[in-house]
Amino acid sequence: GASQISVVVAESTIPQHTRITSEMLTTELIPEDAVHPEALTSIDEAVGGISRSDIVKGEQVLGSRIATEKRRASLSYRIPEQLRGISIPVSEVSGVSGYISPGDRVDVLVAYDDREINETMTVYTVAQNVLVLATGEHTQEQDNEEKQLVSTVTLGVTPGQAEVLAYANQWGTFHLTLRSPLDENIVELDCYSAENFESFRKR
């Protein structure tokens, strides 16, 4: 008879947008000519991925139906649960000269020159140890019709931090600092302005 191949099949129906665990899968020997070209042959390849659509019980599990870290998926599949992706504009200086890459961790500082809030320019660290999801560039139309390339960094933040960053985007200026991947420490910081300017020697 025809040779048989072990492929991954759904042990029970897996709904769309479900994080896949090994319990949801099993392997089955089927004739080689019945194997779908995209069928997975190892359960490990699917575990931890997210189903893009329903996978019916007994159906061969296809690589294209599962979004994993390794397989390039749309950004939404790469955002950790409970977080939101938000993009902020950065310049060469505020974005650490382009050395920031997806997967890095950054602190977000905002400088407010808002006379309504303060009498003076004030810098706040508004978020620490924030995950960078993506970096990119987009073109912005200037008033004089010249196109200017603006860099953006997309961060994974909590819904509360997203509100702070959206406000800062309207009224403040961003600066990012790049962290060591080994350092997850959160530092207690106040703000910095003309009010406590003399403290710079002790910082």
Image (cartoon, rainbow, N blue to C red):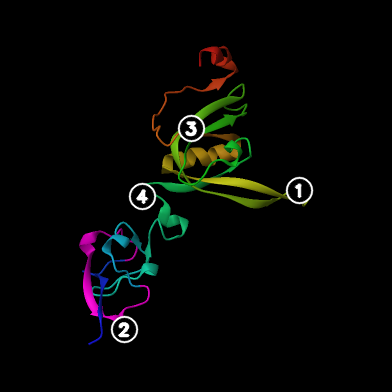
Which sits earlier in the primary sequence, circle 4 or circle 3? 4
Q: Residues within 10 Å of mark 4 (few under 14, many from 20)?
A: few
Q: Amino acid at mark 2?
A: Asp
Which sits earlier in the primary sequence, circle 4 or circle 2? 2
Residue at which label 3 appears: 126
Where in the figure is residue 22, as x and y percent of width and height? 23, 60
Residue at which label 2 appears: 33
Q: How far apart, in angstroms, are the residues tagged by discs 1 and 4?
A: 40 Å
Residue at which label 4 appears: 81
Q: Are marks 4 and 2 in contact (CB under 8 Å)?
A: no
Helix, strand or loop for disc 4: loop
The nearer-to-camera label among 1 and 4 is 4
Q: Residues within 10 Å of mark 2 (few under 14, many from 20)?
A: few
Q: Are marks 3 and 1 in contact (CB under 8 Å)?
A: no
Q: Quadrant of the N terminus?
A: bottom left
Which sits earlier in the primary sequence, circle 2 or circle 1? 2
Name the residue rendered at 29%, 69% in the picture: 41
Where in the figure is residue 24, as x and y percent of width and height? 23, 64
160 shown above or below 134 = above
Q: How far apart, in angstroms, are the residues tagged by discs 2 and 1?
A: 62 Å
Q: How far apart, in angstroms, are the residues tagged by discs 3 and 2?
A: 58 Å
Q: Amino acid at mark 3?
A: Val
Which sits earlier in the primary sequence, circle 3 or circle 1? 3
The magenta segment: 16-38
Residue at which label 1 appears: 143
Q: Amino acid at mark 4?
A: Glu
* Front one among 56 and 184: 184
Q: How far apart, in angstroms, are the residues tagged by discs 4 and 3?
A: 21 Å
Q: Residues within 10 Å of mark 1 (few under 14, many from 20)?
A: few
Where in the figure is residue 82, as x and y percent of width and height? 36, 47
